[in-house]
Image: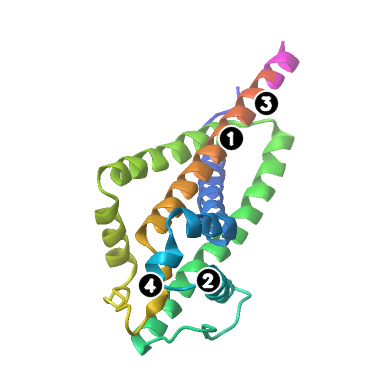
Amino acid sequence: MKKRFSPLNILLSLALVLFIISAAVVITLNFRPLYYWDIGLLDIPAYSGMSREEIVQNYDVLIRYNSIFGPKTLDFPTLPMSESGRIHFEEVKVVFNFFEILCMVSGVLSAAGIVYRCKKKNPGYLLLAGILTVGIPAVLAAFIAMNWEKVFILFHKIVFNNDYWIFDPFTDPVILILPDAFFMHCALMILALVVLGSAVCLLLYRHLKKKGDRHAA
């Protein structure tokens, strides 16, 4: 009987977990319709004093900048930016790029491992990946439900080693078009995508196990 949790299956499951999480982050950060929807839902034009067109224009520039294939410098079309704000966005770009690189690397490793394991007919890695992946969003969702503001602040303190993320709207008015509620919606979308990835792993494991049991009978 093949070992369900063999060392290779454990390594493959970890690569798959990293891919699911990083892919969820990359998809969410580049899913502009979420922000466009929030412009109306959160009434960002009224809060910021800017038109929807101006908000979209500046947001799109920010998202393009944060991409690994984006420009090296950030220049908002209509908004001023302080030196500390510029430094913060440079640090944000590093974080974004890290997840994009992680997504690509773990995706390639996962794909290679899956092809190999399919030939060996040993889908145990899918079960382990599904279990590990669903546990992470469950814990995060609990923290978010308890106090999103504290989670938001703690995240910034962990990721950034300065307080440049605390923007002054007079010197960095971009903060007016990036309300905390939007970032909460991003977090919820990431969690939803991670849960979806976990469900796919578990369903595929169940399907392949049943298929293997039929051939073995």
Q: Mark 2, mark 1: which one is toward the viewer?
A: 2
Question: Label 1 amino acid?
Answer: Cys
Cα distance in 3D space between marks 4 and 3: 48 Å
Distance (Cα) linking label 4 and label 1: 38 Å
Q: Name the kind of residue labelled 4 in the image.
A: Ile
In the orientation shown, which residue stands out farthest toward the top? Answer: 217
Q: Residue 154 sits in which quadrant?
A: bottom left
Which callout, 4 or 3, points to the residue nearer the camera? 4
**123, above or below 71, in the image:** above
- Comparing 189 with 15, the one in front is 189
Q: Which residue is mark 3?
A: 208
How is the protein colored in the picture?
rainbow
Rate crowding at label 1 as few (under 14), some (14 to 19) or many (20 or more) other CA atoms within 10 Å: many
Q: Which residue is mark 2?
A: 59
Assess whether residue 212 is covered by the magenta stretch.
yes
Q: CA distance from mark 1 to mark 3?
A: 10 Å
